[in-house]
Image (spheres, rainbow, N blue to C red):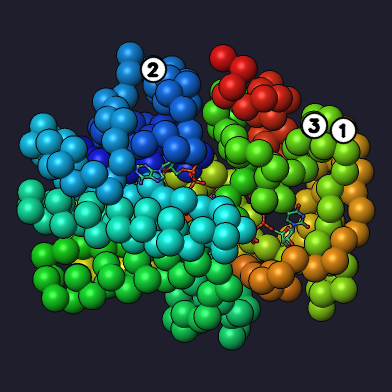
Amino acid sequence: MKILVTGGAGFIGTHTLIELYRAGHTAVVVDNLSNSCHEALRRTAEIIGVDGIPFYECDICDRIRLELLFCDHQFDACIHFAGKKAVGESVEMPWEYYDNNIGGTLTLVDVMRRHGCRNIIFSSSATVYGEPAEMPITEACPKGVCTNPYGWTKSMIEQILADMQRADPQWNVVLLRYFNPVGAHPSGRIGEDPNGTPNNLMPYITQVAVGKRAELGVFGDDYPTPDGTGVRDYIHVVDLAAGHVSALQAIGRGCGLEVYNLGTGHGYSVLDMVKAFERVNGVHVPYAIKPRRAGDVATCYSDPSKALRELGWQARLGIDDMVRDSWNWQRQNPDGFAAD
Ligand code: NAD
Ligand code: UFG
């Protein structure tokens, strides 16, 4: 299939491009590079073994440029990653998040339908479950109250796409709810390159390990979990990327509206992650216990069995692979892509 990948220069987008090409698909990337760079795409093409990946530096809110892009290409489906994703920033700048994430999606899907492309895979998040009623979380678990505007953009976009699919059954919509993506391509050439101070656990750990930050702050050790620290379902980005290729099969057979959790089904605590990182990589990660972070839940992990049953997809890589590949990327690229 020929796939439009919005946000394809980003962390999950670049890894997904590799899996797409590996499975015999082709892709065109649209990205405004607000949180990524040309170098990431250059290295992705290098890993794939192609001269370049067709790329449009364009904002998905820009209807005219999107129209021109759809005049140039006939797409079978769109994998829609483009969006702002920093939880804390979304609390400070809610309008920018609603405008970019929801406004961008509305423009994208309107241009898609005008050009006869009604197949979309959307990057959603476990955050839409809010404070989950049951653990592990299945797709039947009701959506909950989000704790920040970023989360609401995911929840609202899910609603918009589901409503559009119900009104026009020609649409095939797959909502993928990611748990906690970590890791990097095993080559160490591409990986997560956050701007400024990382919000997420794994890039914080790797920046401490490489000496860019003095110590990790562990947000709370008094949760009702085995060691008191927060438990999450970390998933290797290469597994997550492969999940998108599997979701394309569902699109290909006319799935209508589907929702899938993409996680491993295993919960690890913050200290489990720190200890695994130290053990596998032989480096020390100093940490200090800090107060809980507002909006965090104690425990969040998936039941990913629906994706296995219906898509034949399951995560193959474990915690050791995740911490090894995250470190391999950071060690080789202490300043991310900026070094090139
Ligand atoms: P990322 O920031 O690395 O990638 C997103 C890409 O979208 C960036 O390259 C950015 O430049 C681009 N972009 C943003 N707004 C755009 C716009 N208006 N027009 C064109 N391009 C735009 O993030 P990621 O970690 O690769 O995440 C990809 C998607 O998955 C996002 O939608 C994110 O919300 C979602 N998600 C991520 C996580 C996570 O922990 N990484 C978890 C759940 C869901
Ligand atoms: N944590 C720390 N110290 C840090 C960063 C995180 O102790 O410096 C802890 C958190 O308190 C939490 C765990 O590590 O217990 C994971 O935190 P992350 O920020 O890495 O991930 P979250 O589960 O909070 O959120 C992530 C993404 C969201 C997404 C959500 C659910 O950042 O975008 O998963 O998919 F919505």
Q: Tag 1: Cα neighbours inside 10 Å, few (<14), some, or many (≥20)?
A: few
**Closer to the observer: label 3 or label 1?**
3
Q: Secondary structure at mark 3?
A: loop
Above or below, 67 against 269 in this view is: above
Q: Amino acid at mark 3?
A: Lys
Q: Tag 2: Cα neighbours inside 10 Å, few (<14), some, or many (≥20)?
A: few
Q: Tag 3: Cα neighbours inside 10 Å, few (<14), some, or many (≥20)?
A: few
Mark 3 → mark 2, Cα distance in angstroms: 33 Å
Q: Position of residue 162 (x, y in %)?
A: 27, 72
| Disc 2: which residue | 49
Q: Quadrant of the N terminus?
A: top left
Mark 3 → mark 1, Cα distance in angstroms: 17 Å
| Disc 1: which residue | 282
The tag earlier along the polypeptide, 3 or 2, is 2
Of residues 251 and 73, which is closer to you in this image? 73
Mark 2 → mark 1, Cα distance in angstroms: 32 Å
Q: Secondary structure at mark 1?
A: loop
| Disc 3: which residue | 212
Determine which quarter of the picture holds residue 337.
top right
The tag earlier along the polypeptide, 2 or 1, is 2
Q: Residue at x 15, y 42 (%)?
A: 64
Q: Say whether residue 26 is left or right of residue 157.
A: left
Q: Say whether residue 108 is left or right of residue 187.
A: left
Q: Marks 2 and 1: CB-CB under 8 Å?
A: no
Let me know if residue 16 appears in the view. no
